[in-house]
Amino acid sequence: GQQLNQSPQSMFIQEGEDVSMNCTSSSIFNTWLWYKQDPGEGPVLLIALYKAGELTSNGRLTAQFGITRKDSFLNISASIPSDVGIYFCAGHLKAAGNKLTFGGGTRVLVKP
Amino acid sequence: GAGVSQSPSNKVTEKGKDVELRCDPISGHTALYWYRQSLGQGLEFLIYFQGNSAPDKSGLPSDRFSAERTGGSVSTLTIQRTQQEDSAVYLCASSYEDTIYFGEGSWLTVV
């Protein structure tokens, strides 16, 4: 089946830093989605990408749908404390029954 | 409602009991998904409903798990004879086309 490799698994951020995470897949997707999950909550959609090569921003967040349709990255610029949480990428392929395939998550923590 | 609504938000049950988890999708959304997330882990697909088509049950971990969707709207996930390893958060999501929105989850603890 399809698998998504998300990296890094975790990272420490200092306020003001830019952070980046990415996902790669063994097969193509029609749609890439990025979610953030805070403790005790469900995943919240951050950005949706629908076309290969698409670059989309949402405030301090920027995400791109890789041209090969097998990868995507998410950048957070000028990080702030509330950026802490777990970020998940997810790929959606209509031909594969429409279910989302999730990456393992990137846990963003604040540097002590 | 404005978002995907799930109930109960928290459930503690004794091993061996049956539980039912409910999901109210966003109005007008034709697709409905159930995922499971164990503590600190990623999301595991369970089941997918699309309109009147037969559901994709390929993610259900055992025959103790079942789900139905009545009238193309509300869905119920049932876990029979619960086991401790069933403890997790059960997330429901719905979509109209390609963008999928999650509920807050139902946190199940089996003791």
Image (cartoon, coloured by chain):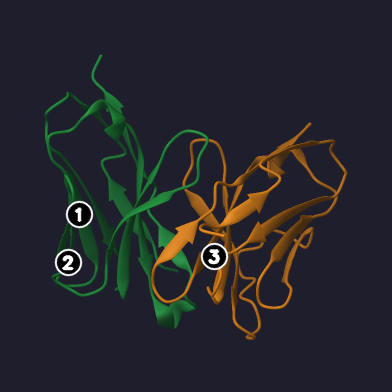
What colour is chain A? green
| Disc 1 from disc 3: Cα separation | 28 Å
- Please give the chain letter of the residue carrying mark 3: B
Provide the residue designation for mark 2: A66
Query: Which circle, 1 or 3, is nearer the viewer?
Result: 3
The answer to whether residue A94 is above or below residue B1 is: below
Q: Secondary structure at mark 2?
A: loop
Q: Nearer the viewer, residue B108 or A60?
A: A60
Dots 1 and 2: beta carbons under 8 Å? yes
The answer to whether residue B85 is above or below residue A84 is: below
Provide the residue designation for mark 3: B26
| Disc 1 from disc 2: Cα separation | 8 Å
- The location of residue B39, given as percent across then percent down, is 55, 36
* Residue A73 badge: 1
The verdict on a common chain for dots 1 and 2 is yes
- The location of residue A31, given as percent across then percent down, is 31, 71
- Name the residue at 49% across, 41% down: B41
Is B15 positioned to the left or the right of B37 in the image? right
What colour is chain B? orange
Dots 1 and 3: beta carbons under 8 Å? no
